[in-house]
Structure formats: C-alpha cells, structure tokens
Amino acid sequence: MRITKEKAEENRQALVRAAGLLFRERGIDGVGVAEISKAAGLTHGALYAHFPSKDALAAEALAHGVERARARLHKFDVDGVPDLTEFLNYYLAPETRDNIANGCAMAASASEIGRQDQAVGARFTEGYLNLVGAFEHHLQQSLPADNARKQALVIVAALIGGITVARATAKSHVELSDEVLDAVRGVVGELAGKL
Amino acid sequence: MRITKEKAEENRQALVRAAGLLFRERGIDGVGVAEISKAAGLTHGALYAHFPSKDALAAEALAHGVERARARLHKFDVDGVPDLTEFLNYYLAPETRDNIANGCAMAASASEIGRQDQAVGARFTEGYLNLVGAFEHHLQQSLPADNARKQALVIVAALIGGITVARATAKSHVELSDEVLDAVRGVVGELAGKL
DNA sequence: TGTACATCAGTGAACGCGCGTTCACTGATGTAC
DNA sequence: TGTACATCAGTGAACGCGCGTTCACTGATGTAC
C-alpha cells in the first residue's frame, strides 16, 4: 500500500517528533521502537523504512529537539536579539521542570548522551554551542571575548545542571527543587550581568 | 548451601558495589540484574535474597555512592574542613570525566533520577544537600547566610551540569569538553570566593 | 490522455535474545536441648 | 560438649514479556511509453 511522497515525509516527521517526546519523558533506553511507531500512527516495520536503527532515530530526534530549542530562543527576540532574562525565566520555571516532554532535549537526556552513539553526542554538542553562542554574544557587550566565552560555557552548563537537579529532587523534596530553580535564576542572571 | 552471616553481608556489599559501578558506567536502565549478580560473584536469584527488587538495589547503590562522595570530600580535609579548591580540581578533572565508574554517582545518573522510584530520588537529594552544605559552610565566612546558601546551591548544580556536559561532548568534540571543565573550574572557583 | 508496470512505504509475523522476577530445592550454618 | 533440627543464603530452571531487527508480502503511487 504505497502512499504519496508528501504523506511519507509527514510520517517520517511524526516518527521523529514522537521519538523526541517519548525519549524526553522516559529516556532513550526507556522507550521501545514499537511504542514510538504506534505514537506516530505506524507499525514498527515502517520505522525501518525511514531509519536504519533506533540509534539513528535517536540522533535525528535530538537534532530536532536542538532545532526546537533554537527556534524557542528566538521567540524571545527583541530587535533581533533574544531577551535572555525571559529565556532564563522560561528555562528554569517550575512548569518547565514538571513538563519534561515540552522542555529542553539536552537537559532531558544529559547524563545518557555520553553512553550513546557518537552521532547523538554530536547533536548535543551542536545544541550546546548554539545556546552558548547566544549568551556569549550578549556578554561580549560588557566583557573581553575570552571572559565572555568562559562565562557563557558555565552559564549553559549551570542551566542544564540546574533543571536536571531540580527534576531529580522534585519528587522527594519539592521545596528544595523550587529553591534550586530560584537560586540558579538569580546567580546566573547576575553572572550574565543583570541581563 | 547456607553460608556464614559475615559472608552473606560481604555478598550484599559486593552486590551494592557492583551495581553502583555498573549503573554509573551504563545507566540504571542499561544494566540487568544478571550482570550485576555475576560481577558480584553470585547468581541473580541471590540478589532477591537481599533486595526485593532492582529498584530497591538502585536506591541502595546510589546511597552507597553518596556515602563514597562524602568520604571523598573529607579526604581533602585540612584542619577538619575540606579544601574545596582541591575538591573542584578532582571533580572537574578530565580523568574524572573519562573514568565515570570512579566518579560522582549523582552526576553519572543525573537525568535518569527523575524517572526512577522516589526512594532513588531521595538518596540523590541527600547527596546533593551534603555537597551543598560543605560549600555553604565555607561561603558563610564571607557572605550573609542567605547568599551563602543560594550560591552553594548553584555551585553544586554547576558542578553536576559541568561534568555532565563535558561527558556528553567528549566523544565528538574533546577540545570543547576540556574547555568546559576549565571554565567551570575557573568561574565556580571565583564564585566560591577564591577558595 | 490512457495504459502497463516498476517502485517502495507500510504491514505484521517471526527471529533470537535479555529482561525482572518467582520458586522448588540444596546443604552448611546457627541454635536449642 | 555433642546431637538433632530449623533456618535461610544461594542455585538454577522457568515464567511471561518486550526488546531491536528482519523479511516476505501488499497495493497504491509514480513513471515510462
């Protein structure tokens, strides 16, 4: 039952989107190809018409998540430059912590990335550098280039660490989890120079 | 073939240690009970004489890792107070990044914790607060209590985020990975007040 | 434009395998007398 | 101290299940004439 090229491309995108969402919610090792295919409205066999393996799908799903993050960052644009305070408020909101499916793909799988295929790690690196670049560009207005780069690297690592710690502590100690989000928002905001 | 109480306790500890090591290396979802038991010199059936489930073993393995971290922190003690600069140098060393089995249990599984049993999350919370307490105590020498707490929360989140990002980027871009470790060491060192 | 046929996205059964967990059984240890 | 027996850590087969991947087949689409 061959289908149109357009429909096939839609199906491919549905697989990538479903995989990204489920991987964020339950981890790459925590979801099977059958469930991903079903969520995309297909059978698992169809997945292998589009991707050679689950690993390849994972890499593409992370790339899609990274592209989503880039688009989201630019939603906060004012005069073509993202308002990083607004971005921080969004990134470190309790709502973002509690809705991991809608959050940052890099943070959702951070500690799993090092154990995956190199292709998956490469997509993570791209996404990380993309965020770092936005903060670096902002910091160059008030700091020498070296320092701007250095602080940007730490800020993004602290964001990923902050939301990850907030998620890890949320079930057993929600007040602490909220406190971590507030603290990171405050200290990173200062580090970035009262954005 | 009943064995002595002492030997049984040794076996229990071997299971906890093997589980901790393998979970750090390959993730909680990435290792099965058979392999853990074998690494401890037992069969999988014996595991269930000590623990009701894999989840319970995971919680105990993380608790053991947290205790190891506490002991390691106090290895850097000078006059009963840990030398945090030395601790930072160790925590963010490229050797620590490359030897995850010997590294921080919280960082190794950070993004997986939120998806595990609440008991696992509770052990993470204890370990996180333990590290936060050490930095908080140090910072109170130069900052008001509120700020000391806030900065300590961010510092430990940045450490976990930093080593996790360094591991995620190491395979595809090792220069960046090294740069992240250096940057976090530098900025966190400054944040902690030129320790 | 109409016809004949090759293409290929998608289906669903089947592959071998490892998963977490249960359980009847073993036999040396620990205990009660 | 010596004997009889209950205890229980550990064994290994078996449970049902889901995993990632393969493959023969389907049939509408896309293409060549």
Image: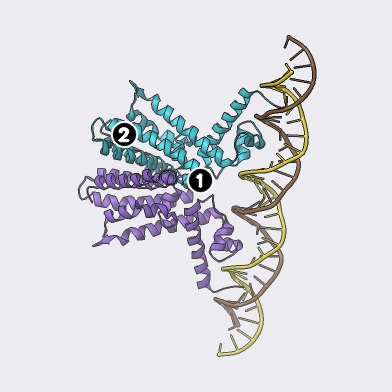
Chain colours: A purple, B cyan, C yellow, D brown
Amino acid type, callout 1? Gln
D28 or B124: nearer the viewer: B124
**Mark seen at residue B136:** 2
Instruction: Say if residue A14 shows up in the picture.
Output: yes
Q: Is residue B122 above or below residue C31?
A: below
Amino acid type, callout 2? Glu
A89 or A171: nearer the viewer: A171
Q: Is residue B127 above or below residue A68?
A: above
**Element carrying mark 2:** helix
What's the chain of the residue with tag 2? B
Q: Residue at x 55, y 39 (%)?
A: B56
Mark 2 Cα-neighbour bin, 10 Å: few <14, some 14–19, many ≥20: many
Count of numbered labels shown in the rendering: 2
The image shows residue B173 at horizontal and vertical percentages of 41, 45
The image shows residue A45 at horizontal and vertical percentages of 61, 62
> Which residue position is annotated with label 1?
B116
Task: Report the Cα–Cα distance between label 2 and label 1.
Answer: 28 Å
